[in-house]
Image (tube, helix red, strand yellow):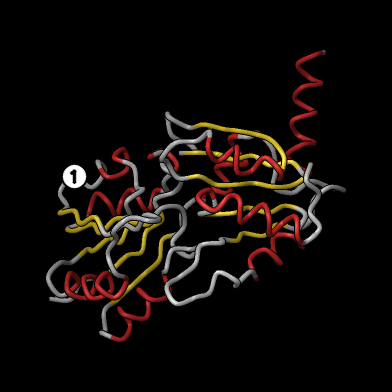
Amino acid sequence: MSGTVYLVGAGPGAADLLTLRAARLLAEADVVLHDALVSDEVLTLAGKAKFYNVGKRANRPSVDQRLICRLLVRMAQRYAVVVRLKGGDPNLFGRATEELNACRAAGVAVETVPGISAAFAAAATLNTSLTSRGVSRSVTFVTPSITRGRAEQDTHWADAAAAAETAVIYMGALQAERVMDALLARGIPANHPVALLESVSLAGERIVRGVVSDLPALALDLGDGPVIMVIGEAFAEARAAIAEASAA
């Protein structure tokens, strides 16, 4: 038997932010290999599937990526519909390349189903736009997270973040001081606006706001959920507009 592997975007967490295709595939799935941060609300949509938690969390034991790739191939040899469920969008910091290549090398059919990335959910929660005419015409998505064997001095992510008018930083909360230092060293003003969002789109969502020099303290105010950082004047402009409207 040869099934199909679907790399499915689970979105930021809320089940009603899944695409219709993602929801249909979950309902049809024989087996689901999911990230650690996929919400229970989303997993319940896969009513007949067997579940395997293959997620990765910073500073915690996690499943080796090579094992995940082997599991996908093995499951496709046993089941018709294999869903690899990834938080956000599979093609953004989701290690999709390794899994796509592993399936292709083994002759396993594989497809990708996009999802809403946390950056877009964060913009919706903040009720603003990642871009703003005359304020932000460039956006970058980066992560300071270091893969095994890479040096901490690898700061290309910081160069990209500093060059954009709006920066979205994934998987950076545990390295908030390093992020702050890297941005300040590249000329980002200490009073540049930032917002950190934890568990965006879920019931336990939290938002803390401040400036770049506040990043370490802001990160300490958050809990154990996934955190995304958004940095740029577009967010300050939106907040000022909301405050002005409220005052009126």
Residue closer to the observer: 241 or 170? 170
* Rendering coords of residue 231 (x, y %): 69, 47
Residue type at mark 1: give it: Gly
* Rendering coords of residue 124 (x, y %): 60, 38
* Rendering coords of residue 173 (x, y %): 53, 48
Which quadrant, please, contains the N terminus?
A: bottom left
For the point 81% across and 58% down, which residue is it? 187
Q: Secondary structure at mark 1?
A: loop
Q: Is residue 101 left or right of residue 182?
A: left
Question: Dot 1 corresponds to which residue?
Answer: 47
228 relative to 242, above or below: below
* Rendering coords of residue 228 (x, y %): 55, 47
Q: In the displayed orientation, state which residue is furthest to the right.
A: 134
Q: In the displayed orientation, state which residue is furthest to the top.
A: 248
Q: Is residue 224 left or right of residue 248?
A: left
Q: Quadrant of residue 8?
A: bottom left
246 relative to 170, above or below: above
- Total marks in image: 1
For the point 82% across and 13% down, which residue is it? 248
For the point 71% across and 43% down, which residue is it? 213
Residue closer to the observer: 182 or 207? 182
Neighbourhood count class around disc 1 (C-alpha, 10 Å): few under 14, some 14–19, many 20 upward: few
